[in-house]
Amino acid sequence: MHARPWSVLAAFILLLAFATPAHAEDPRADMPLAQLELQQRPLRRAEAEASAAAWMALLQQAVQDGTDTTLALEAAKEGAREPLLEKLREITDRRAAITERTNVVLADLEAKGGDVTEYRQYVAAIGDARDDLVARSSWVDIAKRWLTAPEGGIRLAKSLGFFLLLLFGFRIVANIAGNVVARALGKVGNTPQLLRNFLANMARNIIFFIGIVVALSQLGVDIGPMLAAIGGAGFVIGFALQSTLSNFAAGVMILLYRPYELGDVVTVAGTTGKVKAMTLVSTTIMTPDNQIIVVPNSNIWGDVITNVTGSATRRVDLVFGIGYNDDMDKAQALLEELATSHPKVLETPETVVKVGTLNASSVDYIVRPWCKTEDYWDVYWDLTRTVKERFDAEGISIPFPQTDIHVHQVTPA
């Protein structure tokens, strides 16, 4: 019976303990910002208001300490100023750290619906404690203090170091990715070297650009406006370089479908010659008389492309005419003998020699032997000369345009 009041008291204490809302830790000027942000996250508005009040009280005390030290510094003699100035530096660093953390707490409270107008006005009114310190210190001393301050030079050095480390890391990753893309494309058929280099460099540049954006965000740079500016500039540049982008797109299509390769003889955009160089914007062609012609890729892709040396073998089309009074069987046999006996004429496909056309003054034979592509002109020129020599030797005429005039004597009536 006597133990019952103690049981009730214990239950009341436990109930009070569980009913007490969670609260933030006591504010400390050296508390890491990340820890403070995590600490503030679960607090409700009432609890966030209490935390903000605690930080404001700490900030007010730091302001009071700085004011007292400043007044003492003004009244001190020349020999006693250095200790007070050192104390003012410490208070200034502490106040700057408290102000930064107070702003974090106020932002959290404002996001949860709290009224922070009075607090913001107070922070704006007290200003930056560094202004008072600057007025009482030399610039060399200020620079030294800033460089050695945890919230100054040390923090900037860490940020810059992390920035450079990120850039270096992303550069390595970009190079690895580019090499992987190049090797993968090298195993896919006969991918052109120019296309492999283009795609590998694109992969490297994209990854490194992402690294720059991430590194800048770690420095605290707002990358949103920068990305918007890059997008706007890209639109303007793209509009101004429509023809260049058209050539670029055509170059990509040429690399993908590969209608010709370096060293091929082609006829494109009214130009015939050997392909000497290819880029994503233009193709360089050397004509048979050694003229260098640069043709935009858009003109090539939008026109008919003839690859003269695209195949390993090629047919030579020749036409020889004989007179109507000549022996057709003899001419047929001579043409078959000369065409098949040439050392560069292939046995297969079979050479064709047929009567093609009965012209006004000649009977035309078509002669169509096959040869390797690189031997085309040798076969063409050799057969043209050999046929003329043999026809002359065998007495077979090669007609040429001529006009016969017939004169009739008319007797007058």
Image (cartoon, rainbow, N blue to C red):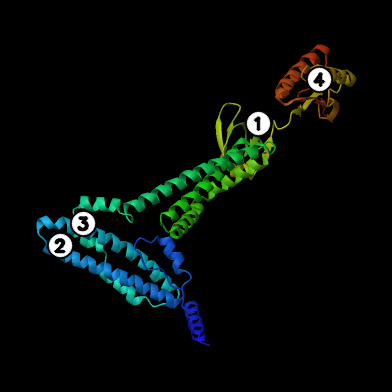
**Residue 208's x, y, as percent?**
50, 46
Q: Amino acid type of disc 2?
A: Leu
Q: Secondary structure at mark 2?
A: helix
Please tell me whether mark 3 or mark 1 is closer to you in this view: 3
Residue that label 2 marks: 73
**Circle number at residue 265:** 1
Q: Are marks 3 and 2 in contact (CB under 8 Å)?
A: no
**Circle number at residue 380:** none
Asked if residue 213 is positioned above or below residue 403 in the image, the reply reads: below
Asked if residue 41 is positioned above or below residue 314 in the image, the reply reads: below
Work out whether residue 370 or residue 325 is closer to the camera in this orientation and state it.
370
Q: Taking 285 as reference, is 158 left or right?
A: left
Gap between marks 4 and 1 measured at Cα: 25 Å
**Which callout, 3 or 2, points at the residue further toward the start of the chain?**
2
Q: Amino acid type of disc 3?
A: Glu
Q: Amino acid type of disc 1?
A: Val
| Mark 2 surroundings: few (<14), some (14-19) or many (≥20) residues within 10 A | many
Q: Secondary structure at mark 4?
A: helix
Residue that label 4 marks: 339
Q: Amino acid type of disc 4?
A: Ala
Residue that label 3 marks: 86
Work out whether residue 163 or residue 211 is closer to the camera in this orientation and state it.
163
**Which callout, 3 or 1, points at the residue further toward the start of the chain?**
3
